[in-house]
DNA sequence: TTGTAAGCGTTATCAC
DNA sequence: GTGATAACGCTTACAA
């Protein structure tokens, strides 16, 4: 203990700790403590600190899949960039709770989530955060911020991307170019992110005064199998001039779409326009840049940290923040070819 | 407290905690405690248990550059993959010290390194870890493991890649193919990793019975400027048939080399062979795969964690581990063209 | 301005 | 087997 190096324990705590009480300490004493601490390399024990004061300047990061999966592009890397920066700027260190990594106790393990109580507050990552343990944490008033929209446990704070607005913007861009029939290809799951995109897509259609007949939104669990050249040619023949895919974990929807178009022998963007609600998968890095929007992951991470530290500081009630996604012009969209403006007279095949 | 719900505190701890002592507890009591805990939604406070147990199951990760730079390829990502997995498997959480991120206190800030003491032990990342603060930590017996070889403070444990052996292997591969004159292009710094590669390179030359005349190792601080088409043509004219570059943070050496070769109008591998001691930069992903070796970063991370937890567990003295790098055949190496086998008769330009 | 003492919620060591 | 009781290292009234 640094107390050996001069003064008393209280003083040490006052000097090294926040000294929220505004107690005045002699410059000399202060320096003596600092000096001693440096000499001994003394650091207050976070656990003890947290136990006594309920605060230790540690922010937790908990994800229900490995935080660092083998494949970079499937990871939370971009989020962490922002999280780390913002946390550092605010004087917090990060605790990565590994509860859910393969080999670990597993996210389902009872108490896995409870470990986050070691930190002052915690960031939650991932689509599939189990509700039950979460609910208790929230009920206990433990400061939590989820990365991504999440309505589930009421009162949970979150920082999400405004997929809806960005998706609407893409659709309106398409409409402005003259497209009248636009299709959305999405995953067949219930993720909030997918739902938001679909809502934005439909809103965009509505805003542009375009109809959204049956079949405008295509849900598929296996894009590679269902979205093929024949399918695409059929839709194109029906008068569809633009296809929109959502970004998925695997990027399969977009991959299937581009493959189908080239399989159908159609040129992009001269004959068909393609848009992607998110970023393209890494392995398509060489291909022409898709029109769509970028998910501001780093900014979302930073925003989440800001939300969390605000929560910690003034005990405000949990709030939520929507971060704007930047429109990406890309080069896969153009005005539709003349003949396709109105739906062709030939009756659509059932 | 669950003690209200039946029995005593000790019993609760025994039931809910690990019960390492192997103490036997009545089934009935046990159930009563479990039941009560569930009813009250009671969860042992992790901070308290860690305080009492004098261990907090936290492994530190400290780097002197931001742990998550904006560009993925410049990051410690691959290391973290292994670190996270192994830590999780062993029941440890990770503390990411943000001390060195932009916006933070800065790595140079006094006491920045001392903060790691809040963890049970710490992993050190990065080439340029300052020695002085480190030395004290080591002297105090704080469990530390450096990622990468490091002789500096005696008694520091490390987990490194066997660059020397892998580099030698690459050179011998080249020699086996018939190359007699091979050059190494390396950075002009004093990193251990560079030194190891150079040593392995020279060892490989020696093992193959090849000479290493002056100029065999080219040190350059600005590869892009010095390694150009003219330079390469000159070396080639002198009889050099293979060029080896080390992997650097920026990948510049390799990038310069490949650019110089194509600038000189030489075909790879028909006219010149190229090898890379490490992995190619991400932006060259589309190019033919360089012959060389892969740095087993994830495995290094996992090994480091293993070393560290061993240190924690049985208090063994710090040890070091060398992880083998896998040879990567690639497609940038082939036997040298006939005429170049012996150095050409024409005198080398000075 | 500085020191004293009482917890914070567990775990560990003993008697019972 | 189970229950007191003393740490664990710190913060925070409160006393000096």
Image (spheres, coloured by chain):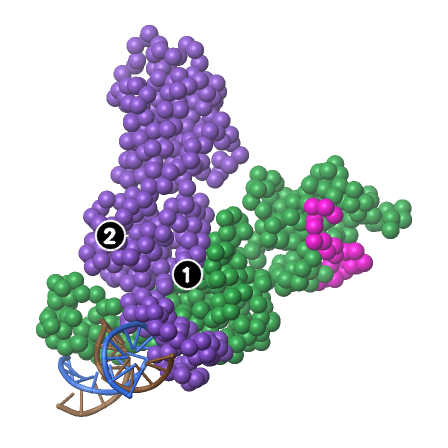
Chain colours: A purple, B green, C brown, D blue
| A103 is higher (above) or lower (below) than B138 | above
Q: Does residue B160 sit above or below B343 in this rendering?
A: below
Mark carried by residue B271: none
The image quadrant where one finds the C terminus of chain A is top left
Instruction: Provide residue A190's location: percent of width, then percent of height.
Output: 26, 39
Is A310 positioned to the left or the right of B260 in the image? left
Q: Would you say residue B143 is visible in this rendering?
A: yes
Do callouts 2 and 1 mark residues in contact (Cβ within 8 Å)?
no
How many neighbours does mark 2 have within 10 angstroms: few (below 14), some (14-19), or many (20 or more)? some
The residue tagged with tag 2: helix, strand or loop? loop
In magenta stretch: residue A206: no
Q: Magenta stretch: residue B225 in it? A: yes
Give residue B133's quadrant in the image.
bottom right
B289 or A153: nearer the viewer: A153
Question: Dot 2 falls on which chain?
Answer: A
The quarter of the picture where the N terminus of chain A appears is bottom left
State the separation of the CA atoms marked 2 and 1: 22 Å
Which mark, residue A317? 2
Q: Secondary structure at mark 1?
A: loop
Q: Nearer the N terminus, badge 2 or badge 1? A: 1
Q: Position of residue B161 (x, y in %)?
A: 57, 62
Residue range in magenta is B203-226
Residue occupying the point 36% across, 25% down: A171
The residue drawn where x is 38% and y is 18% is A179
Q: Which residue is identified by label 1?
A: A91
Give A208 or B196, whichever is nearer the viewer: A208
The chain identifier of the residue carrying mark 1 reads A
B76 horizontally vs A161: left or right: right
Does residue A223 appear in this view? Answer: no
Identify the residue shown where x is 40% and y is 83%.
A7
Residue A46 percent coordinates (x, y): 35, 70
């Amino acid at each position: 203990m640094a107390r050996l190096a001069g003064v008393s324990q209280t003083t040490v705590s006052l000097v090294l700790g926040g000294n929220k009480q505004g107690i005045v300490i002699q410059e000399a004493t202060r320096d003596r403590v600092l000096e001693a601490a440096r000499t001994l390399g003394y650091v207050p024990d976070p656990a003890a600190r947290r136990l006594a004061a309920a605060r230790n300047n540690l922010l937790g990061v908990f994800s229900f899949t490995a935080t660092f999966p083998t494949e970079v592009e499937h990871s939370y890397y971009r989020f962490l960039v922002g999280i780390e920066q913002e946390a550092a700027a605010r004087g917090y260190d990060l605790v990565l709770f590994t509860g859910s990594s393969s080999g670990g106790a597993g996210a389902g393990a009872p108490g896995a989530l409870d470990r986050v109580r070691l930190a002052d507050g915690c960031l939650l990552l991932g689509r599939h955060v189990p509700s039950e343990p979460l609910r208790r944490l929230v009920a206990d008033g433990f400061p939590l911020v989820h990365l991504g929209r999440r309505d589930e446990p009421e009162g949970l704070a979150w920082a999400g991307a405004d997929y809806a607005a960005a998706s609407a913007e893409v659709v309106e861009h398409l409409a402005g170019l003259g497209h009248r029939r636009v299709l959305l290809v999405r995953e067949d799951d219930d993720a909030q992110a997918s739902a938001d995109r679909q809502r934005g897509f439909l809103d965009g259609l509505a805003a542009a005064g375009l109809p959204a007949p049956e079949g405008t939104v295509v849900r598929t669990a296996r894009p590679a199998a269902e979205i093929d050249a024949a399918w695409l040619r059929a839709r194109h023949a029906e008068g569809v001039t633009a296809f929109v895919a959502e970004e998925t974990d695997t990027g399969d929807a977009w991959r299937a779409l581009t493959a189908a178009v080239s399989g159908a022998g159609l040129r992009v963007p001269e004959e068909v326009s393609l848009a992607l609600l998110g970023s393209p998968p890494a392995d398509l890095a060489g291909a022409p840049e898709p029109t769509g929007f970028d998910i501001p992951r780093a900014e979302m991470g930073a925003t989440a940290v800001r939300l969390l530290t605000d929560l910690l500081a003034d005990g405000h009630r949990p709030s939520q923040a929507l971060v704007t996604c930047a429109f990406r012009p890309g080069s896969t969209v153009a005005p539709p070819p003349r003949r396709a403006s109105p739906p062709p007279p030939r009756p659509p095949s059932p």
